[in-house]
Image (cartoon, rainbow, N blue to C red):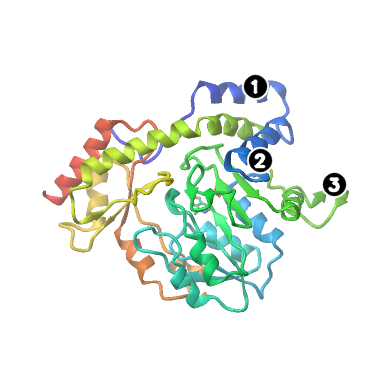
Amino acid sequence: MSIVLNRPNIGPREQEACRRVLASAVLVQGPECEAFEDEFASRVGARHAIAVSSGTAALFLTIRALGLGPDDEVIIPDYTFIATANVVSLAGARLVLADVHGHTMNLDARSASKVVSERTSLIVPVHQYGLGADLSALGEIAPDVPILEDAACALGAGAEHGKIGGGPGIAACFSFHPRKVITTGEGGMITTNDDLLAARIRALRQHGQGPVGTMEPGYNLRMNEISAALGRVQLSRLDEFIEARNKVAKWYEDGLGNLDWIDLPIATPGRIYQSYVLQIHADAPVSRDEFVAGLRRADIQCQAGIEPVHRHAPYRDVPRASLGVSEALAKSALFLPMYCGLRHDEVERICSTIARIAGT
Ligand SMILES: Cc1ncc(COP(=O)(O)O)c(C=O)c1O
């Protein structure tokens, strides 16, 4: 039997919610989206939540609404999903890359400090795989520069200042892609405590229309009502999902914790497990790529680490700090199956397969 990398948990309540919307025939700009926004804002502790069509749309709209242009530099971590870079470029600002921290895989403030300049207008830390980035350290290296949190993977996680999304960043952007902890199919959410920013994002989301007519050229990046209804039920189950994923992480720790050639994800309180990403040491009995091949032969889905931003063709020449940690992670990171519904015996099979591939 194959073990998949991820499977969203869609139950009867989700199905009923989607049927309710279909029966109502109100498919856009209706009560589900508004209710989802209210419930989301109160869950993360933010004044505004704005539902959009994807996590990428959330980031793009926020950077557009901040009004950045070609003279504005935006620092992002090199080790992130390509969307974090694309939105900066598409919004017309200048991308600058900094390295990540080896254990947390989050933006390293010391590396970021090397590329801060008088043109730095925004820093976009990613709360990678559900572990909160160190926003205080970033605040210290550039106290006047706003922070936009890429919280695509971090709904339900805590940061040092409280829940991610309601903290010190100018805004936070979440994704509801099916690989995330809750899903709406495709979807995203922006949270912010800034009234003016929220108003501009709302207008840009919908053709530039504000309370008194068209304010500026805008987009259509709204969330539809079926997605919002699905998201409301999923949000109400967030704690159940987090707990189930914590249990899976504990099983992995039991099964892999004794292998000294693997680093497991950091298990700090407040983190959530959106993905489960190991680091295979260079002196492990076999290479990361041999683990990938062996797991796949055993019908277990897995994924090699993500490609760092600077290796993608459009970003080969962007200014950067030295990116040695990100380069190393691209060779050592290994994603294992992680989802609510993964069984204990399946995790045991994954762990024993890893031990067998290593010959231990
Ligand atoms: C760090 C990060 N940022 C942004 C995104 C984009 O989110 P979406 O796929 O909903 O557009 C993702 C999605 O995987 C992500 O991992």
Judging by the rendered image, the residue that carries numbered circle 2 is 223
Q: Amino acid at mark 2?
A: Met
Q: Name which residue lies at 49% across and 40% down.
A: 178
Name the N-terminal-most of marks 3 and 2. Answer: 3
Q: Name which residue lies at 59% across and 56% down.
A: 168
Q: Amino acid at mark 3?
A: Pro
Q: Position of residue 218 (x, y in %)?
A: 76, 54
Q: Amino acid at mark 1?
A: Arg
In the displayed structure image, the side of residue 90 where residue 324 appears, left or right: left
Name the N-terminal-most of marks 3 and 1. Answer: 1
Q: Position of residue 306 (x, y in %)?
A: 40, 57
Neighbor class of circle 3 (other Cα within 10 Å; few <14, some 14-19, many 20+) is: few
Q: Nearer the viewer, mark 3 or mark 2?
A: 3
Q: CA distance from mark 1 to mark 2?
A: 17 Å
In the displayed structure image, the side of residue 121 where residue 314 appears, left or right: left
**Disc ID at residue 20:** 1
Judging by the rendered image, the residue that carries numbered circle 3 is 211
Q: CA distance from mark 3 to mark 1?
A: 29 Å
